Amino acid sequence: MADFSLWVIVSNLLLAARWTIALSLIAFVCGGVVGLLLLFARISGVRLLERFVFLYVEFFQGTPLLMQMFMLFFGVALFGVEISPWMAASLALTLWTSAFLTEIWRGCVKSVPLGQWDAADSLGFNFVDLMRYVILPQALRISVPPTVGFLVQVVKGTALASIIGFVELTRAGTMINNATFRPFLVYTIVGLIYFALCFPLSLLAKSLERRLNAAR
Amino acid sequence: MPLVSIVDVRKSFGSNEVLKGVSLPVERGDVVAIVGRSGSGKSTLLRCINGLESHDSGTITVDGLEVGGAATDMRVLRRQVGMIFQQFNLFPHLTALGNVMLAPRIVLKMGEREARDIALDMLAKVGLADKRDNYPSQLSGGQQQRVAIARALAMRPMALLCDEITSALDPELINEVLRVVETLASEGMTLMLVTHEMRFARDVGTKLVFMHQGRVHEEGPPKALFAAPQTLELQQFIGASRA
């Protein structure tokens, strides 16, 4: 059996970490866009839309992400449609992220004082302009820290994609462990790489929170 | 025809009937001071006029447009009726100038220059031209309220609704706001003010409306009513506010 040097292990894990980052970015960008659309639906005042988004959010918050990935990966295959682990993972993470972001952002919109809505309404703003020029700029400030904080959850959530066979950091760790039989070393490095990805995000969230509070 | 016509308006919040059939005509140039104890329905009445609250029955028309009517675009109606609030409700993320400019730019779709000129005029009118680049958090309560007045005026409204606009102010800041309102009144602006400033209601108002338990209990020329209130409730109210 070939001998794996530490460098070989680390470099392979780092290469795999690219896919963790890619998956996180996809989940965050696509989940953010979907989440924003759902947010508008959630606060549109149209009962049916609001109800739908409420159920959507409850479903994705109330079931494990892993199960959502299974349902997409195996469920879609039942209908005779081939879906790659890559697609299934991206899709599941996007839906999952959008549900959480919608709920986080809804809280931020609701925390803008009612007087702001009154003021904009009494000046004759329509709903879209009211959101765009009055409510969202204020909600955005409030939302930055929790949103960045949630990104940490997304990064860690990508690890579940390993179970449906997508080769990202965790999956690569498992494969290397199978070849090296050095689980403690391998998973320690895997953990450190996750930490190196998430810790700066946590720091960013904290510093943003401090800066946005100071600006008020 | 009155500019604002309120006929037999009722409004309930759940089982609590706040307005029990209020009727009130407001002519152009009227300065209507609405007084009464808290819970008498004054603020609700004001908020029904521009549709921030919807009334349950009766009719309200503003310049011939029926509030909440099927044929009425409420956004058009609201452009004609300015509102000023107890808590100012300035947009905290915009400067004083930005606050005043926003609605002309976005709602009236004016060009940047035109909106800016109007906004600067209005800020000058309320005596705050030099504060145009300040954010609301950098202004005193009285200054914030004056910016809010400028913001409402920039829409060139036919009438202004003032909902206890001095109640959140420190006593020494009340007069600077009242002076602005007095100027507007003298220029012929139609004003409806819910207020606790009895002296202001008497001296500047052309009409006093005393609300009690969801009804217009007594109304008339302010000076006459203050001198000789007809009902016991108004006597008590005036007595209590003098004390």
Image (tube, grey):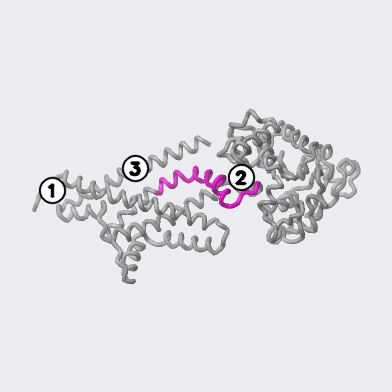
* Chain containing mark 1: A
Q: Which residues are magenta?
A: A123-150
In the rendered structure, find residue A115 and report the number of the disc placed on it.
none
Work out which residue is located at the far bottom of the displayed protein and give it. A79
Q: CA distance from mark 1 to mark 2?
A: 68 Å
Residue sitting at x 47%, y 53% = A36
Location of residue A2 with respect to A53 vertically, above or below: above
Rendering coords of residue B195 (x, y %): 76, 42
Which residue is under mark 2? Answer: B109
| Residues flagged by tags 2 and 3 on a common chain | no
Question: Mark 2: few, some, or many residues within 10 Å (few <14, many ≥20)?
Answer: few
Which residue is under mark 3? Answer: A199
Q: CA distance from mark 3 to mark 1?
A: 29 Å
* Chain containing mark 2: B
Residue sitting at x 29%, y 66% = A82
Quadrant of residue B213 within the rendered picture: bottom right
Rendering coords of residue A125 (x, y %): 62, 49
Contact flag, marks 2 and 3 (Cβ < 8 Å) = no
Q: CA distance from mark 2 to mark 3?
A: 46 Å
Secondary structure mostly taken by the magenta-highlighted segment of the chain: helix
Amino acid type, callout 1: Phe
**Dot 3 lies on which element?**
helix
Rendering coords of residue B61 (x, y %): 76, 55
Contact flag, marks 3 and 1 (Cβ < 8 Å) = no
Q: Magenta span has A148?
A: yes
Residue sitting at x 38%, y 51% = A28
**Dot 1 lies on which element?**
loop
Amino acid type, callout 2: Lys
Q: Quadrant of the C terminus of chain B?
A: top right
In the rendered structure, find residue A4 and report the number of the disc placed on it.
1
* Chain containing mark 3: A
Q: Magenta span has A96?
A: no
